[in-house]
Every structure is written in structure tokens, then in C-alpha cells.
Image: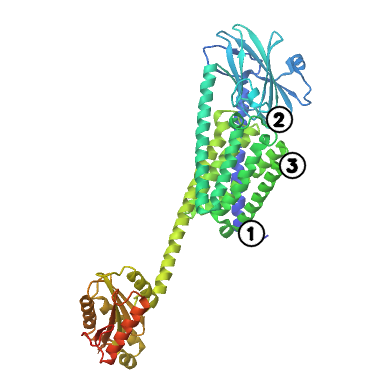
Amino acid sequence: MPHLPWPLLRHLLHTWLRRGLAAAVVVGLAVCVGRGLAAESPRQDATLVLADGQALFDAWPAVRVLADPAGTVDLAGALARRAEFLRPTGPASNLGPRRQVTWLHLPLQVAGGDGRWVLDINYPPLEEVQLHLLQHGRVVAQHRLGSAQPYVQRPMPTRSHAVTLELAAGQTYELLLRVQTNSAMLLPITLSKTAHFIAREAQTQLSQGLILGVALTLLVYSLAHGISLRDSLFGLYAALLVGSTVFFLDFFGIGQQLLWSQRQGLTAMLSPLSVLLAAAAGGQFVMRSLDTRRHSPWLHRGLVLLSALSAALLVLGLLGGLSYRSAQLLATAVGPVVPLLAIPAAWRRARAGDRVGLSMLIGWSAYVVGAFSAALLLRGQLPVTYWTLHSYQWCTLVEMLAWLRVLGLHIEGVRLQAERSAAEKRSFEALALTDALTGLPNRRGMQAALDAALAQAAPGRGLAVFMLDLDGFKAVNDRLGHEAGDSLLVQVSQRLKQPLRRSDVVARLGGDEFVVLAQGVAQPDEAQAIGRKLLAACDAPFQVNGQDCRVGLTIGFALAPEDGLDAGALLRQADAAMYAGKQAGRHQLRRAGAAVALA
């Protein structure tokens, strides 16, 4: 393992100390709040009085608890041990992680009304709840609740564990609940009127549906972009979404209500396995987004290890090699480590002005807040309320939207990189087609322009191909040197462009040879007029190294389509006409096949 410099070690120590102190403060406050809430509850036995003037009652203040570690206490035994039931300590509606069977006793009194009340335990992961309703020591109703029950066998078709109780006005009852679960024993027990329960459940379904709709939209978005761009980062985001979405479908009971009827086998393992999936994908997502291989090698190695471990545990769980309890413990241990490792790196990138780092920092910070809240809740350190139950979900939604921003920045980066690559390609192509001295098209560039022009040539809008050679250039080059010769060639190229149209092309083939392509030439006379302008362009002397230098031109030209449409043949004809002009005395304009000079 490479040696870590002391400043980095000191930074990591300070970071972990601050994080540990913050966690300790949160835990301490949660414990104090929980104990305070418990202290506010009356210590004496209480009876829950139900009256139609109030639509919703929290049953927890009247609940008493009896532990049954051996799981041998039956209903008669629980009734015989009424005096041993005690008020629960700790946060409201939260007994924390408890594998042992627990009996709950709830005395009821119906003050009036129609007596129809819905008892609801709004924590879907509870595996088994046996409900016994007694009046004067006699059982008047029994129901079996819990996620271990197939959905179709539930007393009420709801995602939580609910049942309608028929109670007579003015009567007293005892409610005994035998609860057993592999998850935390969260018991938000309420009694409400049917209309109020339906309205509250509709609001819950609406909010869960909206969040699920957002998740599905983001999933389709990520998969569509991943397929079109062939970028694995979008696949990792999709895996993160699937892991988080499946967890909440199971946690809030939507999955068993809509997708799978029974929660057993693999479906009973969905919550911890989905967390492991999210952890495996999350580590890879961080590595790709923050480019940890280049910027943080130590973090990269840690994330590689965590991702591999999470993936291995996920496979082991899918193959049946993990119990629910083991999978849950491993998931809660591995899951938070990824953001705890990623936050310092994201913080450094954000401080440097990197937008990806800032988005990662926001996303992981939201996740840590939600994860700590969920961990404290499941460890029995927080009361069960709407916000403690749903904070992890809302924080995860913020996290997913932050990752969406990361993907947007990634797409922007891919686009900018593509634009840079295209610009570089155009630059290289331009260099390959351009004469380095004059900036004119070279032989290859001229050939491309000629082929394109010939494709549009037709009678009445022909193409004139001029071959030009300087007269007297060698003498200037020999007398003044190559640098002076190069300066003269640059000036000649500028003079040749002046009398031409913007659509015409001037190219340098090499040495003192040039080619001019003039499109849209209707008659030979027009080509001759252009040739005369080119001859006249070099009449004035050139200034080279402070001296006047005179050079002339000899020009030969051919016309397309009259003289043919083959590029090579037209160039050869124009070159032959130019050579004939050289032989006849120079500074001439000749057309291919003409016996005499035209100028």
C-alpha cells in the first residue's frame, strides 16, 4: 500500500472526527428525544377511549409490552400474565431490533358512535402479527396480519397491516397482539374511522405513486441515453435507481400490494439485496463520475473493493447463501461506506469549482442524512413518525436528482469532447489539404475541390481549369535566396485571389505552379477574360527584401464539360496549353488545343 502523506492523514482524521462527533450528537439528541417522549407518557396503566368526535387515535400511549424470548407464551398465558405487561421505554412506537416474540396489550373503551374502527400498523415489513380482540376475557375476534401472509388473505386489501374492528358503544375491550419480525419492531399503531383511514391511505398511495413515477421516468431516461450513447455510466445510474426503488417498494408495502403477493424466499430478501445492489452500482458510479483512478487513487482502490464486496454479497444472497438478518446487517454496514468515502473527494472537487463534484456532494450528503435517520430509526433511537419513516426516501429522491444532474454534466462533457474531436479532425484535414506556405489548397485540396466542381459542371455553367506557372521566378530565388522566394510566392498567391470571385479556388501545386478553378463559366470568352485578369495581376512589381522584383505568368486552361469531365485529363490539357505558351515566349494565355496565344 503506498505511503500516505501526513497532511492527507491529518485531513482524513479531522474529517472522520467531525463526522463521528456529528453522528454522536445526532444519536444523543435522538436518544434524549426518545427518552423525553417516553417520560412524558403516563406510567400508570391507561385505557384508550374511542369516540366518534375524533377520527384518529394514536394507540401507543396505552400500549403495554411483554417479552417472550422463548416464543412459548400463548393467548391464555399472555392473559394470565397481564400484570407483567410494562409500558415500553424509548421512543414512541419503536422497540428497535428485536428478534424475540413480543406481546402487546391495549385496553379499549368505546365512548359512543357506530363502533367501527380500523386498526392499522403502518410498518409493512413486520412479518407476523396475531391479533386477538377480547371482551370480558372472551375472544370476540381474531385476525392474522403481517407480510408473511399472502396479500389475498389479508383482512383488508391495504399495503399496511389493517383490520376493521366491530366494537359496541359503551363497552370495554382488550386487544392482544403477538408480534414477531426479522426486521426492526416498529409499531405505529392507530385506530381511525374508516373514511379517515381511506383518505390517509389515498394520500400515502398518491405520494408513493408520484415518487415511483419519477423513479420510472428517470429509469427510462437513463436506459434510453445509455443505449443511444453506449455509455455504461447510465447503466450504473439505472442500477442505483432499481436498487433504491425496489427497497422502497418493499419497505412501504407497495410491492406486496401490487407486484408480488407473498413475501417469502427471495421476495423476503428484497430490502437488503436492493441496498447491496445500490452499493455495488454506487461505488462504480462514483469512480466514473469523479474519475477517481486519476484524481484519488486511494479512494479508487477503496471503492473498487467495496463495489466488489457488495456485488459478491448480492450474488451470495441471490443464491440463498445469506439469511435475512445477515443480509440486513451486511447491507447496513456496507451501504453507508460508499458515500462516506466519496464525500471528501466530492468536497475537494466542489471547492475547485467542479460542477460534478458539487452535485455529487449534494447527492451523497442527502443520502447520508437519510441513511443516518433510517439507521437511528431501525436501531430504536427515533420515534416513528411520518418524517422519520419517510426521510430516507425523500433524501434518496434528492440523491437521484443530484445524480441526474451529474448525468447531464456528463452528457455535456461528452458533447464538448465530441465537438473538440470534430474540430481537431477538421483542423487535421485542413492541414492535410492546405499549403503550409501560402495557406492555399495544396494538390490534395485542389483535387477535392476539382472533383466537387466537376460534379456540378454542365453546359451553360461550365468549369474553367487554369494551370499557372511563374515566369522568372528561378532567377529571383537564385539571386535573393529561398526566403525571398517564399515571400514572393506568398505575394503572388494574394495577387491571384484579388481579381477572382469568392467561389473561385486558387491552389498551389508546389514550387511556382498554381491552379485556378472558376465555376459557372458559360462561354469560352468568360474563361479568357478571367485568364487576362490573372495575367494582369502580376504586371506590377513585387517588393521583396526592399527590392523590386518582376515575374510574369504563363497560363493554360481547359473547359468542362466541353473539353471533358475527367479531372486528370483536364489538368493535363491545361498543363499542355501552359507548356505550349512557355515554348512560344511566355506571359501568354492559351486554351487547350489552341494553336495560338489568346493574350
- Quadrant for residue 60, please give it: top right
The residue under label 2 is which amino acid type?
Answer: Arg
Q: Nearer the viewer, residue 23 or 85?
A: 85
- Quadrant for residue 320, please give it: top right
Q: How far apart are the alpha carbons under marks 1 and 3?
A: 38 Å
Q: How far apart are the alpha carbons under marks 2 and 1?
A: 42 Å
To which residue does mark 1 refer?
4
User: Is label 1 in a helix, a strand or a loop?
Assistant: loop
**Residue density around tag 1, few if under 14, some if 14–19, many if 20 or more, within 10 Å:** few
Q: Position of residue 415 (x, y in %)?
A: 45, 56
- Badge nearest the viewer, 2 or 1: 2
First of labels 2, 1 by sequence position: 1
Q: How far apart are the alpha carbons under marks 2 and 3?
A: 23 Å
To which residue does mark 3 refer?
321
- Badge nearest the viewer, 2 or 3: 3
First of labels 1, 3 by sequence position: 1
